[in-house]
Image (spheres, rainbow, N blue to C red):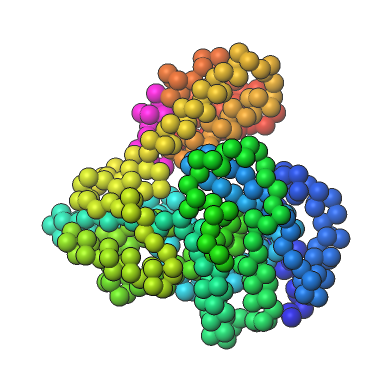
Amino acid sequence: MQANFTETLFQAYFDCRRNKRNTLNALKFELHFEKYIFELADDIRNGTYQPGRSIAFIVTKPVKREVFAAQFRDRVVHHWLIRKLNPFFENEFMEDAYACRTGKGTHFGIRRMRDFMQQCAQENEGEAYVLKLDIRGFFMHISRTLLYDKLEDFIAKNDKIEDKLFLLDMAKRIIFNDPTKNCFIKGDKSLWDDLPKDKSLFHSPAESGLPIGNLTSQVFANFYLNDFDHFVKEKLHIKYYGRYVDDFVLVHPDRQYLSGLIPIIENYLKTNLQLQLHPKKRYLQHHSKGLAFLGVMIKPNRIYVGYRIKSNFYTVLKQQNEVVSTSPINKSVVMQFVSRMNSYLGIMKHYHTFRLRQHIIKKKMNPWWWKFIFVKSQFLSVERLKWARYVVLVFG
């Protein structure tokens, strides 16, 4: 094992706490983090490390889904393992796999898909069709055995990866850990009642499923579909293709060719990855009709924010407006208002939404909030006037 193992574990800890520092588990760990890191390093070296108990809960925004949150200690291990493997994964991943990758993400994927539609149309006298498909219950049906076998083969063939057996042992403990065993259910159990079975680990086939919520799950999901990405690009000869987790889009000038690829893709996923296409989530249209992708509607020359984002923003703003009459106004209340506004305006600023943002600010926001914010006409920016921290929400 490399001599700098403990040092890389500390780096993983700092990566992990960057976005989780205010959670209870993270705060408890931080109190004595050096002691806990050394103890964790000993457990990993000795081969006694085992993933701990997960917390299961339901989130409803942006869509309803089941999440399993690992203990903070386990999250540190996840970050450590991904730090070790990611450089080698990135050498294999195609550019247009957008999820959970530095420099990629939703905005990058949306722009790429817009460019693909425009380029295909320009090259083919306006003829460009988009085929959008979705994998049914993707995370819940990933074969753990197949994933591990693919990872074992990948590591064995890569001469630059050090400590191969050690990394495989840690990956195996994480991949084959069943978070449904002895998990803690947080919140109302009835929230699971109307959740489709193919979206819950509690109903996954034997030895299948990765928990949504873990960094390892997100990155291993990309790795699991990497061969499929290359199949589409190199065997099916699709020049314009992109994927975000289990949503993927093919752009081609021939509608019939795209239609004929559907059974081929179905067969590949079933035969090679034990996955199925969702029968009700198949979209094949001329590019001029637009493409709903990653929360927006992509048209030939414009990108509009999707209904879900607008609806959620209106809901949040309604809640914040009600705060004025139901709660005493103090610093934390105003900070929450600015933060929630910033979250949605920050998303919407990337697309053609200037008039929509004007309408929301001028017509939907409770006028009472003007005591604490104002709009700069040249930027259409929201600023907090009172209390210590100066915040500017530029969304022009």
Q: Is residue 274 left or right of residue 50?
A: left
Q: Nearer the viewer, residue 198 or 154?
A: 198
- Number of residue marks: 0
Q: Is residue 235 left or right of residue 386?
A: left
Residue at image coords 82%, 71%: 42
Residue at image coords 20%, 56%: 128
361 is higher (above) or lower (below) than 45:
above
Where, quadrant-wise, is the N terminus in this rendering? bottom right
Q: Is residue 115 visible?
A: no
Percent position (x, y) of residue 342? 54, 34
Percent position (x, y) of residue 367? 51, 14
Q: Nearer the viewer, residue 55 or 91?
A: 55
Percent position (x, y) of residue 175? 61, 67
Where, quadrant-wise, is the C terminus in this rendering? top left
| Most common secondary structure along the magenta stretch | helix
43 is higher (above) or lower (below) than 292:
below
Q: Is residue 289 visible?
A: yes
Residue at image coords 65%, 64%: 177
Q: Is residue 289 magenta?
A: no
Q: Is residue 327 left or right of residue 198?
A: right
Residue at image coords 53%, 58%: 204
Q: Is residue 353 magenta?
A: yes
Q: Nearer the viewer, residue 359 or 67?
A: 67
Q: Nearer the viewer, residue 289 or 278?
A: 278
Q: Which residues are magenta?
A: 350-359
Percent position (x, y) of residue 286? 20, 51
